[in-house]
Amino acid sequence: MRGRRSRKALLLVSAAAALSLVGACGATGGGAAGGQNGAGGVDSGTTTLQQQPEIGKEPHQMLSATESGQVGWFVADAGGFALYRYDKDTAKPPKSTCDGECLKTWPPVLVGEHTMTSGVDPTLVGSVDRADGRKQVTLAGWPLYRYTGDKKAGELTGQGKGGTWFAVTPEGKKAQADDGAAPGSTGDGY
C-alpha cells in the first residue's frame, strides 16, 4: 500500500511539473480547455473526443500514468484518453501493422514536437516509422494508438477488443482486469 501512495505522490508532482512545462512552452491547441487536465490526466469526464485536436496534429504529446478500477495503471494522453497497444504489432523491432480500415477505428499516436511523460519512464518512449511515412510514438517498443470508441477521458471501451487491443501500462505491457483476466472481446479487433 505504501508503494501505491508513493507512486500517487510522485504522479501528482510529475503531473504538476509537466503542466507547468506545457504552459511555459506556450503550447496552443494541444491541451484541454479550462483546466480539465487534473492529476493523472483524468478529469470529471467533460473532455470529449470531439474537443481534442485532430489526432496527429498535437504540437506536444503527453503520456501520463493513470489509475483505473477496471485495469489498474494505464497510460493516457494529455486529454485523459486511454492509449492502446495492438497484439499484432511487434515491439522488438517496433513495427505497426494497423493500416487501412484499422486506422479509422484505431488512429496512431503520432510524434509531436515534444513528448512529455508523467509517471512513465521517458527512456521507454520512442518512435517507429510507419509505412505511410509518419512517425508513431512507441512505449517499450509497442506502437501506441487511440480508440475512437472512447468518447470521454478515462473510458477504456477499447480494452480487450478483438482479443488483440489492450490499454498499455506505464511499462509498455498489456493492462489487465484487476482479476488478471482480459475482458471479453467483441468487434473492432482487426
Image (cartoon, grey):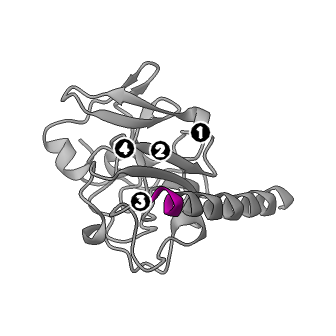
Residue type at mark 2? Thr
Crowdedness of circle 3 by 10 Å Cα count: few (<14), some, many (20+)?
few
Secondary structure at badge 3 equals: loop
Q: Which mark is residue 122?
A: 1
Q: Residue at x 53, y 60 (%)?
A: 24
Q: Nearer the viewer, residue 42 or 72?
A: 42
Q: Which mark is residue 27?
A: 3
Return the residue at label 2: 115
Q: Looking at the picture, which amino acid does disc 4 mark?
A: Gly
Please name the residue that numbered disc 4 is placed on: 112
Q: Is residue 128 magenta?
A: no
Residue 96 percent across, percent down from the top left:
31, 30
Disc 2 to disc 1: CB gap under 8 Å: yes
Inter-mark Cα distance, 4 to 3: 12 Å
Q: Main secondary structure of the magenta part?
A: helix
Crowding near pointer 2: few (<14 within 10 Å), some, many (20+)? Answer: some
Inspect the image, locate mark 3, and give the three-letter code of the amino acid beneath it: Ala
| Residue appearing at x 54%, y 39% in the figure | 172
Local secondary structure at mark 4 = loop
C-alpha span from label 4 to label 2: 7 Å
Say which label, 1 or 4, has the lower sequence index.
Answer: 4
Q: Residue furthest top?
A: 93
Which residue is most to the right? 2
Residue closest to the far left = 100
